Image (cartoon, helix red, strand yellow):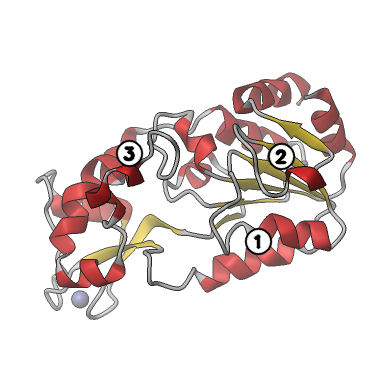
Amino acid sequence: MEILIDAIKRAKTTMFFTGAGVSTLCGIPDFRGPDGVYRDPDAARMFEIDLFDRDPGFFYSHADALVYGNSETRPGPVHEALVALQKAGKCAGVATQNIDGLHERAGSDPVFAVHGSAALHHCRRCGAQKTFDEIRALRAGVPGAVPLCEKCGGPFKPDITFFGEALPEEAFRGAMELAGRCDLMVVLGSSLVVQPAASIPLAALRAGARLAIVNRGETPLDRFAFFRADDLAAFAQAVQRSV
Ligand SMILES: [Zn+2]
């Protein structure tokens, strides 16, 4: 880890790209891992936009544990480590595949949530907007309750990118812009298989940045990385020791 910490200290602009591994450290279930949510075929369909529009209750009945039960989940050691690096001027931005909002809650800025997040919800019919907390209040803790718009009666949907929806353009553009000008890209807890989000580290590599990867398990970009390790907790500890 000293090699990686040293590279972060010497880099001018370091960008971080994070995936599920960063959040599973805080007890949030992974989607695609060995114990992943997607092994439950029902849960795998909860993020299909066609199904949401036919039956929003299907999403909300499955989302209680995964999305709305997480409001008490606190940022984990990696989230905190990235904030510590930011305060030391060593984190220029975080792009994340995670939809749990924990980087934002920890205080990272900017965060490019390239698969969206549940921080905001919009009415599918009229576009009215509500925050996560407003939606929680509207659902009043009733299991599976669909939050309905007071103006038009339409269902609210979280700004998580569902299958069949385009990625949030602004977040993706911001991430690609930073990837194109960073000189160090550090991938944390992503196996880099979900496209097009995984193309962000590749864009950094193509623009001449050095690449480091900390992830349990192989990634398709391992052979391009000057540093490769498995243990995210060890990374977080090494950061806290050095800043
Ligand atoms: Zn509405």
Q: Secondary structure at mark 2?
A: strand
Task: Indicate left or right for 131 with 154 as reference.
Answer: right
Name the amino acid type tagged 2. Ile
Residue located 63% across and 25% down the image: 231
Q: Which residue ends up furthest to the right in the rendered image?
A: 10
The CA distance from mark 1 to mark 3 is 28 Å
Q: Secondary structure at mark 1?
A: helix
Q: Position of residue 117 (x, y in %)?
A: 42, 56
The CA distance from mark 2 to mark 3 is 27 Å
Q: Position of residue 182 (x, y in %)?
A: 80, 55
Q: Nearer the viewer, residue 195 or 13?
A: 195
Residue located 54% across and 73% down the image: 169
Quadrant containing ligand 1: bottom left
Q: Residues within 10 Å of mark 3 (few under 14, many from 20)?
A: some
Name the amino acid type tagged 3. Asn
Residue 129 in view in this figure: no
Residue 10 in view in this figure: yes
Task: Indicate left or right for 89 with 62 as reference.
Answer: right
In the image, residue 24 above or below residue 86: above
In the rendered structure, which disc, 1 or 2, sits on the residue that comes first in sequence? 1
Q: Residues within 10 Å of mark 2 (few under 14, many from 20)?
A: many
Quickly name the residue at label 2: 213
Q: Nearer the viewer, residue 30 or 8?
A: 30
- Residue 225 lies in what quarter of the image? top right
Name the amino acid type tagged 1. Ser
Q: Is mark 1 within 8 Å of ligand 1?
A: no
Q: Secondary structure at mark 3?
A: helix
Disc number for residue 199: 1
In the rendered structure, which disc, 1 or 3, sits on the residue that comes first in sequence? 3
